[in-house]
């Protein structure tokens, strides 16, 4: 039961609220950003927000000017009167029991809790101070918290320790060295550490052992490919156009460029500028032009009967939306049909941003499977021997490939505010510009994509650096400091450690947008190196681990689960770049969804030989039928820009691990290696498999259980007539004729069990 000491607006202002909703206490000083704004945004802005076309009762609560103004026909009452709750009708309405007066109204299906009502009331009592939305203020270097120097390696730890201390908590102990090397290896390369690398790290007692390990991982091609894998989600990369016919497209040379950029540690500002506006740089080279394929990765239709202009508008909208999600952390698409209901972005500003991407000579409708989406460039062996030497053309079926890129028209295409966002309802003409609430567009910047990129990386831009470092933090901790890494607006989550986020953002910008350096800085913190162990008390205090008193335990991504199985089994083909490949997939799945167009995507023809074992980064991605095993483990569909994947746990995931030919085949190959390495002892064979899968040796109890399982499987094979041939012939990997098939089958089943362990598909 909620308890108030001054729950009525007519009682004395001097009385204080004691307790609301159990132990949840009202802060002494109510903060607009962290206490009030989330309530207004969630419960009030739908009818009283920044969208001027949706305001009810002439009241907008999004700015103090509008919130404090006189209301009604006679201008005789006010929703908010600072320091006076008796004259503030907002207080009266939120506490009213009259369904005709109560706010939010019943038909909105929104409701304020007692705690939220008390927050709003106390905020008005204290003066109803408004602040600009936190993410629209330029980040500045905060004061570093002063904490007792008993824990912590760098300044990250000072911010974390200070927040833990405020909440009566202490950081966890450091994880074991086996756990740390497994964690950092997966986070930086997407692969488990090899047994040799583990052994070297465990025996290296130097002070720089961990730092040297990080440095060695950051310069590997595996690191570059792992970073590129995440960028495929952000860039909505696919090997087909999408929509019904879903014809094949050639964009893999652009993917090769992304890997190259991360391998070279290209500064983030340059990396983004090349992709947004490489063609507009002075005397652009082929690499810079190829990079602009980023903004041609969207879906394109070839469906007969489609209206070309309607779809062309959709392509431009896709680029605008991607700009918002990937670089600004804002839902710009919400302002397409009307002013944004929650963030200070008008429909006019939406189409001003839209106009930056509206002047390329593209078609809204492709003529068929062989039609290239203009504009494009041709890449042949001659270009690959020059500036594009990072492209792997060896496996290309064609000597010359066409790749879609960006190009400006000689005369800019006029842009208009579209009524309700509809392609054929233009209204007022607009010109390239940016939202004033973020940062005014400098007059001396060109009104094109190159100027837009300069605006993104202007020192005064409040969002770009924050959004980028938040995503790097998300890579290392599973969640960003702002958990909604796709939304830094009013509807997004508040940062758990706002000063730390600003510190990292300023550091990232001032140190040259160096991605490797930032990842290393995060990895070196003792916050990152904590154990995942959790006590009941800690779980009760911070169930979501928002304060980071422990390291998060994370399930591996879809790509990492498959690539790990290939790596530890010795099957992984580490060839870099080139055309996409087609590993195992259920029979007939493409045929079920193929439209009338046919073409190369009508039927799925699996790859052969070593191409079956390429990294998941290179798996052919058909938009209408993405790789089913990867989708089961929450891979992005690649239809739209995605900066954070869903996290689910379903029985289907267990079924994939039990039945996927790739996992079964990897189990067999791993078992065969164990038989070869440890010829006599079953216990040693199991230890060999277990260590490769989990990065540690099994304890006595685990070894007894797994050995017992092996013996039980062998008994069933020998005595109950279990057929080994069926199990041992799943997949293309062949076994020597001389091997004992019964022992191999039993050990393969044991290996398969180990690959299904929760610890194997997680990093702790």
Image (tube, helix red, strand yellow):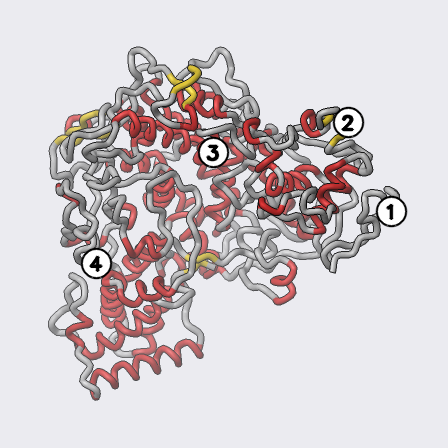
Distance Cα–Cα, label 1 vs label 4: 68 Å
Which of 549/237 is in front? 237
Distance Cα–Cα, label 1 vs label 3: 43 Å
Residue at image mark 1: 15
Question: How far across and down, in percent of the image, does residue 348 sit?
Answer: 48, 21
**Label 2 element class:** loop
Distance Cα–Cα, label 4 vs label 3: 38 Å
Residue at image mark 4: 586
Distance Cα–Cα, label 2 vs label 1: 28 Å
Answer yes or no: is residue 385 visible: no
Q: Please say if the residues under marks 3 and 2 sit with CB atoms less than 8 Å apart.
A: no
Which of 293/12 is in front? 12
Mark 2 packing: few (<14 Cα in 10 Å), some, or many (20+)?
A: few
Closer to the observer: label 1 or label 4?
1
Q: Mark 2 or mark 3, which is nearer the start of the sequence?
A: 2
Q: Residue at x 54, y 33 (%)?
A: 341
Answer yes or no: is residue 195 visible: yes
Q: Please say if the residues under marks 4 and 3 sit with CB atoms less than 8 Å apart.
A: no
Instruction: Using the image, tell me which numbered label, if any, was put on residue 76.
Output: 2
User: Where is 303 relative to 376, above or below?
Assistant: below
Residue at image mark 3: 334
Q: Mark 3 or mark 4, which is nearer the start of the sequence?
A: 3
Q: Mark 3 or mark 1, which is nearer the start of the sequence?
A: 1
Mark 1 packing: few (<14 Cα in 10 Å), some, or many (20+)?
A: few
Closer to the observer: label 3 or label 2?
2
Q: Mark 4 or mark 1, which is nearer the start of the sequence?
A: 1
User: Where is 585 relative to 36, above or below?
Assistant: below
Q: Is residue 744 left or right of residue 508?
A: left
């Amino acid at each position: 039961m909620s308890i108030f000491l001054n729950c009525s607006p007519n009682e004395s202002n001097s009385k204080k609220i004691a307790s609301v909703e159990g132990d949840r206490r009202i802060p002494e000083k109510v903060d607009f950003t962290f206490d009030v704004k989330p309530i207004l945004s969630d419960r009030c802005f739908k009818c009283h927000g920044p969208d001027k076309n949706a305001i009810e009762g002439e009241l907008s609560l999004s700015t103090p000017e509008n919130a404090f103004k006189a209301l009604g026909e006679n201008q005789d009452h006010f929703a908010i009167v600072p320091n006076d709750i008796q004259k503030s009708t907002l207080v009266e309405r939120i506490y009213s029991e009259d369904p005709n007066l109560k706010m939010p109204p019943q038909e909105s299906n929104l409701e304020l809790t007692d705690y939220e009502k008390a927050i709003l009331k106390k905020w008005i009592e204290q003066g109803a101070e408004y602040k600009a939305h936190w993410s629209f203020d330029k980040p500045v270097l905060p004061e570093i918290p002063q904490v007792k120097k008993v824990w912590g390696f760098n300044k990250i730890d000072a911010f974390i320790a200070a927040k833990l201390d405020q909440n009566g908590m202490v950081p966890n102990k450091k994880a074991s060295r086996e756990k740390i090397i497994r964690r950092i290896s997966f986070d930086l390369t997407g692969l488990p550490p090899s047994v040799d690398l583990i052994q070297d790290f465990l025996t290296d007692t130097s002070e720089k052992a961990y730092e040297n390990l990080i440095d060695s991982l950051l310069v590997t091609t595996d690191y570059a490919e792992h970073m590129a894998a995440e960028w495929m989600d952000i860039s909505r990369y696919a090997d087909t156009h999408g929509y019904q016919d879903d014809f094949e497209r050639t964009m893999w040379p652009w993917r090769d460029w992304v890997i190259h950029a991360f391998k070279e540690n290209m500064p983030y500002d340059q990396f983004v500028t090349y992709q947004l506006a490489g063609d507009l740089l002075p005397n652009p080279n082929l690499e810079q032009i190829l990079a602009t394929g980023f903004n041609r990765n969207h879906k394109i239709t070839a469906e007969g009967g489609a209206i070309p202009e309607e779809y062309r508008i959709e392509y431009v909208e896709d680029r605008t939306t991607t700009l918002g999600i990937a670089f600004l952390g804002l839902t710009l698409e919400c302002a397409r049909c009307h002013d944004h209901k929650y963030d200070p972005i008008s429909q006019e500003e939406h189409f001003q941003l839209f106009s930056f991407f509206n002047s390329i000579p593209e078609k809204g409708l492709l003529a068929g499977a062989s039609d290239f989406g203009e504009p494009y460039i041709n890449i042949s062996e001659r270009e690959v021997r020059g500036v594009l030497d990072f492209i792997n053309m060896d496996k290309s079926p064609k000597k010359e490939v066409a790749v879609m890129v960006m190009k400006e028209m000689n005369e800019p295409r006029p842009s208009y505010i579209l009524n309700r966002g509809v392609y054929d309802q233009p209204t007022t003409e607009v010109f390239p510009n940016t939202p004033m609430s973020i940062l005014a567009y400098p007059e001396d910047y060109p009104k094109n994509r190159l100027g837009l990129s300069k605006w993104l990386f202007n020192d005064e831009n409040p969002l770009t650096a924050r959004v980028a470092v938040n995503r790097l933090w998300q890579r290392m901790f599973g969640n960003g400091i702002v958990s909604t890494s796709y939304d830094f607006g009013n509807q997004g989550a508040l940062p758990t450690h706002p000063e730390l986020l600003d510190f990292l953002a300023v550091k990232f910008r001032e140190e040259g947008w160096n991605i490797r350096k930032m990842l290393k800085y995060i990895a070196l913190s003792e916050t990152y190196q904590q154990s995942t162990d959790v006590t009941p008390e800690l779980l009760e205090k911070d169930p979501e681990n928002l304060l980071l008193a422990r390291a998060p335990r994370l399930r591996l991504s879809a790509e990492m689960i498959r690539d790990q199985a290939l790596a530890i089994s010795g099957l992984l083909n580490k060839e870099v770049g080139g055309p996409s490949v087609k590993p195992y997939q259920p029979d007939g799945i493409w045929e079920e969804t193929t439209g009338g167009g046919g073409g190369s995507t009508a039927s799925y023809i699996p790859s052969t030989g070593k191409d079956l074992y390429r990294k998941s980064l290179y798996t052919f991605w058909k938009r209408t039928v993405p790789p089913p095993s990867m989708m089961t483990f929450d891979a992005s569909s690649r239809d739209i820009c995605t900066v954070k994947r869903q996290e689910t746990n379903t029985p289907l995931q267990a079924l994939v691990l039990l039945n996927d030919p790739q996992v079964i085949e990897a189990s067999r190959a791993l078992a065969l290696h164990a038989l070869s390495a440890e010829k006599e002892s079953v216990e040693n064979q199991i230890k060999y498999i277990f260590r490769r899968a989990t990065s540690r040796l099994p304890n006595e109890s685990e070894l007894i259980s797994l050995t017992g399982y092996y013996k039980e499987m062998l008994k069933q094979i020998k005595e109950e007539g279990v057929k080994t041939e069926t199990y041992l012939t799943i997949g293309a990997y062949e076994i020597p004729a001389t091997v004992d098939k019964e022992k191999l089958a039993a050990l393969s089943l044991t290996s398969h069990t180990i690959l299904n362990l929760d610890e194997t598909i997680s990093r702790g």
